[in-house]
Amino acid sequence: MPLLAVKKYNINIVNDTLTFTTGYFRAEKSSVLPRGVYSPEFSSMLSAAAICVMVYILVPQIRDISSAFLIIILTVVYVICFLGARKFLFHDRNLKAVFDKKSRLLEVETTRVLIKKRRKYPLDNIRSVEVGSKRFIPENIDGIKFVEKISAQHGSYVPGLDETEEFVTLSVKFKDGNEQTIFAGKIDDEPEIPLREINNFLGIDI
């Protein structure tokens, strides 16, 4: 357990606007594949390599040129595809929440693959900003044990699949019963929660 809370967000207040940004806003079960292996960079490399192979197979004219020139062409294609995939397909997902007292709106923007999703809520519809929790309990323990056994036999043991994961969340609650989660962090990491800063800005008693 860390001795100090881990800050995984940024808050900027300018006049009547509070801008909150974070890459931690999804409470979800960890992937079976470790992030160190199945990373955005690795996914981009695989995609770029697959495109190079497709270009080589689908464009027969490219095989008629000299080996040196072919290597140059495929290298350029690989670099372009890698950078494009990293930026547009496998980029880190982020959330930005802008509380604007002047326009009386809360605008939440999330980035996904090639799409930016924006949602707007009236500030007057905000009932509260609250801390909550979410828990993921493994269901198929026998299946998990089998996967761990097979992966260990192949030298790629994946620990923690049978562990319960708990998240602390920060959500904006609305008077119409809806809510918008703007932050989620694993309880084991003891994440710092910006509850007081946002409530103070909105003038909500806590």
Image (spheres, helix red, strand yellow):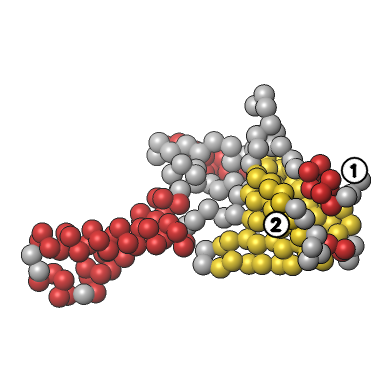
Q: Which residue is mark 1?
A: 206
Answer with mark 1 or mark 2, whichever residue precedes in sequence.
2
Q: Nearer the viewer, residue 120 or 36?
A: 120
Badges 1 and 2: C-beta atoms under 8 Å apart? Answer: no
The span from disc 1 to disc 2 (Cα, nearest Å) is 20 Å
Q: 65 left or right of 20? A: left
Say how many tags the image has.
Answer: 2
Give the image location of residue 189, x and y in percent: 66, 34
The amino acid marked with disc number 2 is Ala
Asked whether residue 157 is in view, the answer is yes
User: At x 23% / y 58%, what residue is drawn?
Assistant: 75
Q: Which residue is mark 2?
A: 97
Image quadrant in which you'd find residue 54: bottom left
Q: Quadrant of the C terminus?
A: top right
The amino acid marked with disc number 1 is Ile
Give the image location of residue 163, x and y in percent: 65, 38
Q: 86 left or right of 148? A: left
Give the image location of residue 49, x and y in percent: 30, 59
User: At x 17% / y 75%, what residue is drawn?
Assistant: 60
Furthest-front residue in this view: 15
User: At x 12% / y 63%, what residue is drawn?
Assistant: 69
Q: Quadrant of the N terminus?
A: top right
Q: Nearer the viewer, residue 62 or 101?
A: 101
Asked whether residue 133 is in view, the answer is no
Q: Does 194 appear above or below 101?
A: above
Q: Regarding mark 2 in the picture, which secondary structure is present there? A: strand
User: At x 53% / y 42%, what residue is drawn?
Assistant: 146
Q: Regarding mark 1 in the picture, which secondary structure is present there? A: loop
Binning the other alpha carbons within 10 Å of mark 2 as few (below 14), some (14 to 19) or many (20 upward) gives many
Furthest-left residue in this view: 66
Binning the other alpha carbons within 10 Å of mark 1 as few (below 14), some (14 to 19) or many (20 upward) gives few
